[in-house]
Image (spheres, rainbow, N blue to C red):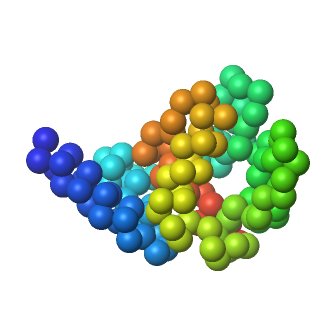
Amino acid sequence: MLQKIFSLLLFASLYAVAATPAELLAGYTAQAGQPAQVARGEAFFKASHGQTWQCASCHGQSPMSGGRHASTDKAIEPLAPAANPKRFTDGAKVEKWFRRNCKDVLSRECSAAEKADVLAWLITLR
């Protein structure tokens, strides 16, 4: 129980000041209580999850390239930090977009483990 509370406090502090994708990943991993898995993150990104949209519907098959929103056709900058250094540098924005996008793709919010897995995969892309 105490470890869970510590993990949540650590995540909250990282969330408030996170300046790098690695710091956000550490926070999500601590909150999830398990290591992130790159392969699971890639599979999550590409899966339909029983819904019409998947992450790739808007972000494209390669997060190293830009995408277009599936309904508004608005341009979306590359998701991978290697292609877009501004990605995953603002904890509040990251949470906002995970919340919105997960509801579009899953019809629910993503778990900390799902966020950690996807972010771990995105960090590996070059």
Q: Residue at x 88, y 48 (%)?
A: 73
Marker count (numbered): 0
From the viewer's perspective, is residue 84 above or below residue 51? below
Counting from the top left corner in percent of width and height, residue 86 is at: 63, 74
User: Is 84 situated left or right of 88 in this image?
Assistant: right
Pick whichever, 91 or 28, lies toward us. Answer: 91
Q: Residue at x 23, y 56 (%)?
A: 9
Q: Is residue 108 visible?
A: yes
Counting from the top left corner in percent of width and height, residue 10 is at: 26, 60
Task: Name which quarter of the figure residue 15 lies in.
Answer: bottom left
Q: Which residue occupies the extreme right position in the image?
A: 73
Pick whichever, 110 or 97, lies toward us. Answer: 97
Q: Residue at x 60, y 34 (%)?
A: 103
Counting from the top left corner in percent of width and height, residue 66 is at: 82, 62
The quarter of the picture where the N terminus appears is top left
The quarter of the picture where the C terminus appears is bottom right
Q: Is residue 26 visible?
A: no
Q: Residue at x 69, y 61 (%)?
A: 79
User: Is 126 situated left or right of 93 in this image?
Assistant: right
Q: Which residue occupies the extreme top position in the image?
A: 50
Pick whichever, 37 or 105, lies toward us. Answer: 105
Pick whichever, 39 or 16, lies toward us. Answer: 16
Q: Which residue occupies the extreme left position in the image?
A: 2
